[in-house]
Image (cartoon, rainbow, N blue to C red):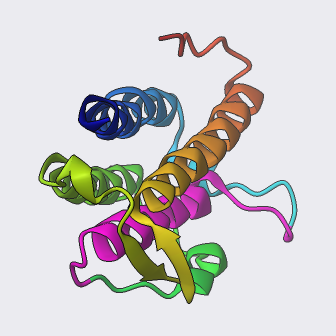
Amino acid sequence: MNDTAKNFIDESREFLSGTYLPQIERCLEQLTDEDIWRRAGEESNSIGNLLLHLEGNVREWIVGGVGRLPFERVRQQEFDERRLISRAELIERLRKALKETDEVLANLDPALLNDRRQIKERDVSILRAIYHGVEHFSMHAGQIFMLTKMRTGKDLHLYY
């Protein structure tokens, strides 16, 4: 079981930092700051909002939840943001959050995956918290890919 648990942690790290981050970076390279903050409508999120949300969510669930490290988050602000934060700043913030996430996962004892954590007033296993962090990141990364394709009209070559 320990090999399976270690593999789960390693694969989670690879998905977040080795797959999704480079794919998001590839998208952002093709967009202007204005493209990143464009919305289909007031009820829609921009790519910029999604990036802020990914940063906040991964910090809450993995850095703070699993790693029990301090973090600050006001979730609604991630969606309410309207300032034109530069692409460079957004990607640097996401890289930093994923570096912190990777450090937590790299130092996690696989034997602790069934231990419990209180995250967002929920009692969850560490395994579930990591699983949630990865699947949530994947879902919003997919939205970023779709919005980028819509804005550029290009094949993004995101295969892995």
Residue at x 53% of width, y 80% of height: 123
Q: Quadrant of residue 68?
A: bottom left
Q: Does 105 sit left or right of 139 as displayed?
A: left
Q: Is residue 72 above or below residue 4?
A: below
Residue 155, given in percent of the width and then of the height, sits at 65, 11
- The number of callouts visible is 0
The answer to if 45 sits in the magenta stretch is yes
Whether residue 27 can be seen here: yes
Which quarter of the rendered picture does the N terminus lie within? top left
Q: Does 21 sit left or right of 149 as displayed?
A: left
Residue 63, given in percent of the width and then of the height, sits at 29, 68
The answer to if 89 sits in the magenta stretch is no
- Which SS type dominates the magenta stretch? helix
Looking at this rendering, what residue extends furthest in the front direction?
A: 1
Residue at x 58% of width, y 16% of height: 156
Q: Quadrant of residue 117?
A: bottom left
Instruction: Please report the bounds of the magenta region as a residue range.
Output: 42-70
Residue 52, given in percent of the width and then of the height, sits at 49, 65
Q: Is residue 54 above or below residue 28?
A: below
Q: Is residue 150 above or below residue 144?
A: above
Residue at x 55% of width, y 55% of height: 132
Q: Nearer the viewer, residue 80 or 4?
A: 4
Residue 109, given in percent of the width and then of the height, sits at 17, 53
Q: Nearer the viewer, residue 66 or 145?
A: 66
Residue at x 61% of width, y 52% of height: 47
Whether residue 34 can be seen here: no
Q: Nearer the viewer, residue 34 or 144?
A: 144
